[in-house]
Structure formats: C-alpha cells, structure tokens
Image: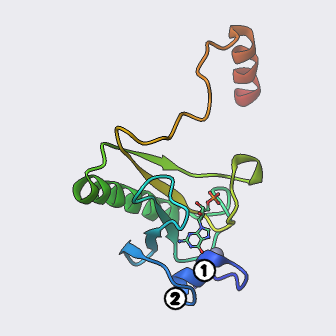
Amino acid sequence: MAQDPDCIFCKIVAGELPSLVVAEDERTVAFLDVNPATPGHTIVVPRDHSADLHAIGAEDLAACAAMGQRVAGLLVDRLDAAGVNLLNNVGAAAWQTVFHFHLHVVPRYADDPLTLPWIPAPGDRDEIGRTHARLTA
Ligand code: 5GP
Ligand code: ZN
C-alpha cells in the first residue's frame, strides 16, 4: 500500500488520525470534512497515496468516482440533500491544500450559503477559438 509518512489523509486511511468514516471499500475511504462547506461535506480518498489528479491511476480514479456516486446517494437519502456538488482541486492555484487526491462531495440545500465561484458571462469568440487551437494543435 503506497503511503506518504507526512500525509494527513494517509494517516486517516491508516487509522493513525481519527476521522468519521461514512463509507469505505477495498480501494477508497469516505469521511466527513472537518471544515464542512455544508452539513455532510464528505471527502473521498484512495487508500493508496497519489498527490493529485495527474498522479492517480485509472483504477483508483474510477473507484473514487464510484464512491463519490455512492456518497452522493447517501447524502440525498439520509440528509435530504436537494443536490450535490463534486469537486476536485488540482494544484495550489486551484485551492488544493492536501496533496493526496480527494473528491469533495458537498451536499446542497435550498437555503445553504454557497455560491458559484465564477461569474458566468459570454466569452470572446476569437479568444475561445484561439484556446481551442492551442488545445487541439
Ligand atoms: P483541498 O483544499 O485540498 O481540496 O481540501 C482539503 C480538505 O481536507 C479541506 O476541505 C479540509 O477541511 C479537509 N481536511 C484537512 N485536514 C483534515 C483532517 O485532518 N480531517 C478531516 N476530516 N478533513 C481534513
Ligand atoms: Zn497520502
């Protein structure tokens, strides 16, 4: 089992740090976030250490996605969530603070305080075209 001795989530997976586990399977563990965005905010991690989306293997990624789906169902069934956001932060510039891959599974409620973190507005068509060219060249 790949572990990083300095990683908080590896310690949670190993039971060396306490956590409130809501579901687990052979490859993944899902536990409540200590700083919940909303009640029931859950973190899904692979048991094996991978720093982020770029590093994780396809099987662990698929297992995390499946566990995210299972937890989303739990949040709706048990906590009456009206919706769910799945979030994965990749890199410090994208808000990642713990460098062990994880999915945030955030239950949403009609009266919760969360807002979309960007302001939707029509993009410049030429710029979108240039971006497309860079991505597909
Ligand atoms: P990130 O910003 O890396 O995407 O998210 C890391 C998440 O892990 C944060 O939401 C943070 O609250 C949560 N977290 C950090 N340390 C601990 C911990 O020791 N226990 C639990 N349950 N969650 C943690
Ligand atoms: Zn780790």
The label on residue 36 is none
- Examine the rendered structure and indicate whether residue 8 appears above or below residue 104: below
Residue 108: % across, % down: 39, 45
Q: Label 2 is placed on what type of residue?
A: Gly
Q: Ligand 1, what quadrant?
A: bottom right
Q: Does residue 99 appear left or right of residue 64 in this picture?
A: right
2 or 1: tag closer to the N-terminus: 1
Residue shown at 45%/68% (left/top)?
32
Residue 27: % across, % down: 45, 75
Which quarter of the picture shows residue 4? bottom right
Q: Does residue 53 appear left or right of residue 14 in this picture?
A: right
**Does the Cβ of the disc 1 residue fall within 8 Å of ligand 2?**
yes
- Label 1 Cα crowd, 10 Å radius (few <14 / some 14-19 / many 20+): many
Residue shown at 70%/28% (left/top)?
136
Q: Label 1 is placed on what type of residue?
A: Cys
The label on residue 15 is 2
- The residue wearing badge 1 is 10
Q: Does residue 14 appear left or right of residue 76 in this picture?
A: right
**Does the Cβ of the disc 2 residue fall within 8 Å of ligand 1?**
no
- Asked which colour scheme the image uses, the reply is rainbow
As drawn, which residue projects farthest toward the left?
77
Which quarter of the picture shows residue 6? bottom right
Quadrant assignment for the N terminus: bottom right
In this rendered view, identify the residue nearer to me: 126 or 121.
121
Residue shown at 39%/60% (left/top)?
40
